[in-house]
Image (cartoon, rainbow, N blue to C red):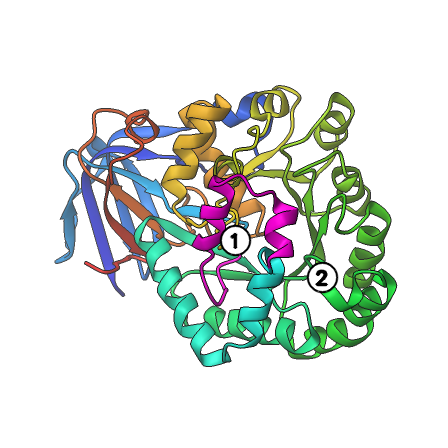
C-alpha cells in the first residue's frame, strides 16, 4: 500500500463528512481545519484532522506543507476543450465593433470552428486536446466535462466524441462527455431545422449509444438557434438513449431554456446571463443546478450572471470555465473563482464551494471528488504560502498554486 502523510497544513479547505448539494446560505459554509494533517492511501483520502490528533506514523513519504493551504481540485463542469483552432482573428474583429452576425457572415463563429474541425484528423485533435487538458490540470482542475458541438455533421460529431472517449481512457483525471450536436444549425439546414434535428436523432444518437460515446446531451437553447420546443424534442430523444440533459440556457435572451431544463429534470442549465424573477424561482424550486460561466460574460463584454439573486433565492450554483475558442478561451478555474467574487459579488467561500463540491455534483462525481472527504480521490491543490483564503480571488493576477496532486501523486513537478 502506498501511503502519503501531509503535515502542518496551514488550512485544509472544504472538509466534509458527507455530501450535500449546496444551495442558498449553505453555499457560504466552507468547513476548514487549521494546522491540519492529511493521510492518503493508494491515491484516496484515508484520514485527516488537526495536527494535535496525529499519532506516531511510519511512512517514508511525508510532506511538510507548512505555510500552505490545501483545497480539493477544481471540478470544471462545462467546457468545449476539443477544438481544431483558436479564433483570435474574430477577437480583433469584435474589438473593431463587428457584431456576431457580421462575424458569422465572414465565415466566423461556431461554423468557423466546425469547418476547421472537420478538416482536422482525429489524432491531431487528440494531441491538441491533451495539451490543453494538461494545461488546465496544472492550474488545478481535477475533473472536467467536455462537449462536442464543433462537428455539426454525423462524421464530425462522432469524431469529436471519439476523441473525448480516448481522453477519458488516457486522462489521469475524470472526464465526462456531452453530446452537443445541437450547437447551431449548419448552413445547409439553416432553413430546414427539422431535417437537422432528424439527423441528430436518427443518425447520431444510435451510434453514440452503440459506442458509449457520451454521458449527457446538451442543446443551445437560444433565440436564433434552438427553440425551447426543439430543445425539448432533442433532449427527450437523448433521454431515450440513456443521456441526461445539460442545457445551454438564457445566455442572450429569456429563451425558455431554464424552464425546459427544469421540466426535463436536467442535471444543469448553464450560462444564465439573462434571468428574471420567474425564471430564478423556477430554478430555485428544482433539483437542477445553475452553472455560471463568468469568463464567457467577461470575454463577450456582456452583463455578468445574477449570482447574488440566484443564491439568495435558494438556487444550487456551480461555476465552470466554458473553455472554448470563441467566447471563453481560457480553462483557468482560478480566474473563474476570482471573477465570480469580483464581478458577481460571490463570497470566496461561495465561489470555492461552487467550483468544487457543486461542480462535482454537476458531473455526478460528488462521490469521488469535490471535497476533503474520506474515501474520495486525493485530487488536491497545494497553494503557495498565502495570508488567507480570501487572498486566492483577491490576488487574481498571481499564480498562487504551488503544486497539483492527482490521486496522491504530484503532476508536472
Horizontal side, residue 324 vs residue 70: left or right: right
Quadrant location of residue 288? top right
Which quadrant would the N terminus be assigned to in this image? Answer: bottom left
Residue 328 visible in the picture: no
Quadrant location of residue 69? top left
- Give the residue displayed 36% in from the left and 52% down from the top: 379
Q: CA distance from mark 2 to mark 1?
A: 18 Å
State the SS at label 2: loop
- Mark 2 or 1, nearer chain start: 1
Residue 336 visible in the picture: yes
Foreground of the two, 38 or 26? 26
Foreground of the two, 154 or 212? 154
- Give the residue displayed 39% in from the left and 67% down from the top: 130
Horizontal side, residue 385 vs residue 152: left or right: left
The percent coordinates of residue 44 (x first, y second) are: 36, 55
**Position of 168 relative to 75 (above/below):** below
Q: Is-magenta flag for residue 99?
A: yes
Quadrant location of residue 179? bottom right
**Position of 95 relative to 276 (above/below):** below
Horizontal side, residue 309 vs residue 10: left or right: right
The percent coordinates of residue 188 (x first, y second) are: 77, 68
- Give the residue displayed 53% in from the left and 57% down from the top: 80
Q: Is-magenta flag for residue 41?
A: no
Image mark for residue 111: none
The residue identified by callout 1 is 79
Local crowd at mark 1 within 10 Å, few (<14), some, or many (≥20)?
Answer: many
- Give the residue displayed 19% in from the left and 58% down from the top: 413
Q: Which residues are magenta?
A: 79-106
Image mark for residue 243: 2
State the SS at label 1: loop
Local crowd at mark 2 within 10 Å, few (<14), some, or many (≥20)?
Answer: many
Foreground label between 2 and 1: 1
Amino acid at each position: 500500500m502506498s501511503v502519503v502523510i501531509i503535515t502542518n497544513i496551514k488550512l485544509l479547505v472544504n472538509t466534509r463528512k458527507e455530501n450535500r448539494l449546496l444551495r442558498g446560505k449553505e453555499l457560504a459554509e466552507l468547513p476548514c481545519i487549521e494546522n491540519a494533517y492529511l493521510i492518503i492511501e493508494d491515491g484516496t483520502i484515508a484520514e485527516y484532522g488537526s495536527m494535535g490528533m496525529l499519532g506516531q506514523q511510519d511512512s517514508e513519504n511525508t510532506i511538510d506543507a507548512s505555510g500552505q493551504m490545501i483545497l480539493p481540485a477544481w471540478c470544471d463542469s462545462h467546457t468545449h476543450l476539443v477544438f481544431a483552432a483558436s479564433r483570435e482573428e474574430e477577437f480583433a474583429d469584435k474589438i473593431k465593433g463587428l457584431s456576431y452576425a457580421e462575424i458569422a457572415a465572414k465565415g466566423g463563429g461556431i461554423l468557423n470552428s466546425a469547418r476547421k474541425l472537420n478538416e482536422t484528423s482525429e489524432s491531431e485533435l487528440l494531441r491538441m486536446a491533451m495539451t490543453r487538458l494538461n494545461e488546465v490540470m496544472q492550474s488545478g482542475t481535477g475533473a472536467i466535462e467536455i462537449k462536442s458541438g464543433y462537428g455539426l455533421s454525423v462524421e464530425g460529431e462522432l469524431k469529436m466524441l471519439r476523441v473525448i472517449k480516448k481522453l477519458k481512457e488516457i486522462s489521469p483525471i475524470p472526464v465526462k462527455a456531452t453530446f452537443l450536436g445541437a450547437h447551431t444549425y449548419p448552413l445547409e439546414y439553416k432553413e430546414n431545422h427539422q431535417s437537422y434535428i432528424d439527423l441528430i436523432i436518427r443518425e447520431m444518437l444510435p451510434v453514440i449509444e452503440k459506442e458509449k460515446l457520451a454521458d449527457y446531451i446538451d442543446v443551445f437553447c437560444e433565440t436564433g438557434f434552438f427553440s425551447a420546443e426543439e430543445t425539448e424534442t432533442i433532449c427527450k430523444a437523448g433521454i431515450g438513449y440513456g443521456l441526461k440533459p445539460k442545457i445551454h440556457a438564457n445566455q442572450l435572451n429569456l429563451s425558455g431554456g431554464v424552464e425546459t431544463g427544469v421540466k426535463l429534470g436536467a442535471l444543469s442549465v448553464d450560462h444564465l446571463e439573462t434571468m428574471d424573477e420567474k425564471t430564478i424561482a423556477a430554478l430555485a424550486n428544482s433539483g437542477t443546478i445553475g452553472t455560471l460561466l463568468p469568463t464567457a460574460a467577461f470575454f463577450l463584454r456582456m452583463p455578468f450572471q445574477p449570482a447574488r439573486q440566484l443564491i439568495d433565492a435558494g438556487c444550487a450554483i456551480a461555476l465552470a470555465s466554458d473553455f472554448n475558442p470563441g467566447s471563453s478561451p481560457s480553462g483557468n478555474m482560478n480566474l473563474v473563482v476570482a471573477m465570480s467574487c469580483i464581478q458577481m459579488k460571490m463570497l470566496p467561500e461561495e465561489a470555492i464551494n461552487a467550483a468544487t463540491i457543486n461542480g462535482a455534483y454537476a458531473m455526478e462525481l460528488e462521490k469521488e471528488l469535490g471535497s476533503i472527504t474520506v474515501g474520495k480521490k486525493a485530487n488536491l491543490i497545494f497553494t503557495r504560502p498565502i495570508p488567507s483564503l480570501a487572498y486566492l480571488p483577491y490576488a487574481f493576477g498571481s499564480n498562487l498554486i504551488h503544486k497539483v496532486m492527482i490521486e496522491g501523486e504530484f503532476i508536472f513537478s
